[in-house]
Image (tube, helix red, strand yellow):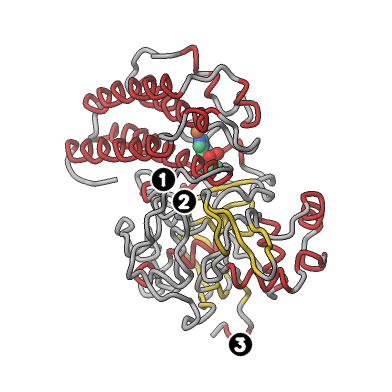
């Protein structure tokens, strides 16, 4: 979100709305058959996501902020994620791709009228500005979900990757220290100020942590392969009870999409078959696999607070930054975000995106599973409604941090919290590990 006059803010919001819509159209410009097909019971048909983003925009911007009449009250229920689980969505009388595009375009025209007429000063700025920011982030989140659907899809490629920006760093993390220390003490977790922060990121609060060490970079495919080669998937000692149960029931042997061919590992990436690159962060592992790898490596997953302290806390000032590198919005030289590369950058990239504690790639590349369950911060207030976050709090979901290559900068920051079931791995999920500091390291 930009500071400045109401008109500057309006232009910034209009630009972000246009950018996310271009992204949505690019992800749904394939054949009609690909859009209406259910590629996996884990995901909606792409055409559901397409109309759902417009349906939410109609509810939040056109009706709530604008106080306008409903365009299509008859389809509210069909695009309500709580009414229909993903697996059942193909049997709904969904709008066709063409009708979906027309519908979301009509909603957008109304939303832009509402934007023109909304007060973006004084107390109304907070509420109205947030509503637009939330809708922009919501559409980007569904675009990332659509990328996960594209990855699940069988058949020839329909999305073409753009190269990972050049000059982002070395081709390996080998010359970097494998872990960085984070000294004991309090830091500010969460935010009360960030204008587009969602309810679950609020409010800012102090958390006091013992000293710990955290991996400089996310765990790579090469490192993960050593766990596989050491028969990590065959040895229950590395797995928690529920983790081992799931590993057996689901027959897990390697990350999702990996296939062994002779001595090597290969994978299908957006329709293209390729060797698994050792230097890239591992993707498509579930929380239980991350947990087992960490135990095998003699380490553990960081807690959510540890992850955020490593990402935001600056020992020089004692303050928490918005991002690892400081306050500025992400630059292409600092993080792999935006969904164009269709892959993470190799581990050790983005020296310009390092945190004050020296860790890299905390933002972008892969979502990072942390040890913690998804729970409210002290002082949490549901906003704009309990169904966004509050109904998910508890023991069912684990937290992921930092965003992936498929996350847009508008929906990524040091405080951003994602969550999913610990068995899920169709998302762009990886992890890094941590350990307690020894007594003689606590200085
Ligand atoms: C925060 C990614 C778990 O996709 O289910 C989208 C975001 N909420 N529509 C999800 C969301 C409502 C949410 N995650
Ligand atoms: Fe949604």
347 relative to 119 in the view: left or right: right
The span from disc 1 to disc 3 (Cα, nearest Å) is 39 Å
Residue 59 position in % (x across, y down)? 42, 23
Q: Which marked residue is nearer to the observer: mark 1 or mark 3?
A: 1
Q: Judge whether residue 223 can be spotted in this image.
A: yes
Kindly indicate the quadrant of the structure image that contains residue 138: top left
Query: Residue 251 location in percent, x, y?
Result: 78, 53
| Figure quadrant of the C terminus | bottom right
Tag shown at residue 440: 3
Vertical position of residue 370 compared to residue 394: above or below: below
In this rendering, the answer to whether 311 lies above or below 56 is below
Secondary element under disc 2, as helix, strand or loop, is loop
Above or below: residue 35 compared with residue 216: above
Tag shown at residue 250: none
The foreground one among 152 and 216 is 152
- In the rendered structure, are the residues bearing label 1 and label 2 in contact, judged by CB atoms less than 8 Å apart? yes
Q: Nearer the viewer, residue 57 or 443?
A: 57
Q: Which residue is mark 1?
A: 197
- Distance between mark 3 and mark 2 Cα atoms: 34 Å
Q: Which mark is residue 416?
A: 2
> For numbered disc 1, what is the local secondary structure?
loop
């Amino acid at each position: 979100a930009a500071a400045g006059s109401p008109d500057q803010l309006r232009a910034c919001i209009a630009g972000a709305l246009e950018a996310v819509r271009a992204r949505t159209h690019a992800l749904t410009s394939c054949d009609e058959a690909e859009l209406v097909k259910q590629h996996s019971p884990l995901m909606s048909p792409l055409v559901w996501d397409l109309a759902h983003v417009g349906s939410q925009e109609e509810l939040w911007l056109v009706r709530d902020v604008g106080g306008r009449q409903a365009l299509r009250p008859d389809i509210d229920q069909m695009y309500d994620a709580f009414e229909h689980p993903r697996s059942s969505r193909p049997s709904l009388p969904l709008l066709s791709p063409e009708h979906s595009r027309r519908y979301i375009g009509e909603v957008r025209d109304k939303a832009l009228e509402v934007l023109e007429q909304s007060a973006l000063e004084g107390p109304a700025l907070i509420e109205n500005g947030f509503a637009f920011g939330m809708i922009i982030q919501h559409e980007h989140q569904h675009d990332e979900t659509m990328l996960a659907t594209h990855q699940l899809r069988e058949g020839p490629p329909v999305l073409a990757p753009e190269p990972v920006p050049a000059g982002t760093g070395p081709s390996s993390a080998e010359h970097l220290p494998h872990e960085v220390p984070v000294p004991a003490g309090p830091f500010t977790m969460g935010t009360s100020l960030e204008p587009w922060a969602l309810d679950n990121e609020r409010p800012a609060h102090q958390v006091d942590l013992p000293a710990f060490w955290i991996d400089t970079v996310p765990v790579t495919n090469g490192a993960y392969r050593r766990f596989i080669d050491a028969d990590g998937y065959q040895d229950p000692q590395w797995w928690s009870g529920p983790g081992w149960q799931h590993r057996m029931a689901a027959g897990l042997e390697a990350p999702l999409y990996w296939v062994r061919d002779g001595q090597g590992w290969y994978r299908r990436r957006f329709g293209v078959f390729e060797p698994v690159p050792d230097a890239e962060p591992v993707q498509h592992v579930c929380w239980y696999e991350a947990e087992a790898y960490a135990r095998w490596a003699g380490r553990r997953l960081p807690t959510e607070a540890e992850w955020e302290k490593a990402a935001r806390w600056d020992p020089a000032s004692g303050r928490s930054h918005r991002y690892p590198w400081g306050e500025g919005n992400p630059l292409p030289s600092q993080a792999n975000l935006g969904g164009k590369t269709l892959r993470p950058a190799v581990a050790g990239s983005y020296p310009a995106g390092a945190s004050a504690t020296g860790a890299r790639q905390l933002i972008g590349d892969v979502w990072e599973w942390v040890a913690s369950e998804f729970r409210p911060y002290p002082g949490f207030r549901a906003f704009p409604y309990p169904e966004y976050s509050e109904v998910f709090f508890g023991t069912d979901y684990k937290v992921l941090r930092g965003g992936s290559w498929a996350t847009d900068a508008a929906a990524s920051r040091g405080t951003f919290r994602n969550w999913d079931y610990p068995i899920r791995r169709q998302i762009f999920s990886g992890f890094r590990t941590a350990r307690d500091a020894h007594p003689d390291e606590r200085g």
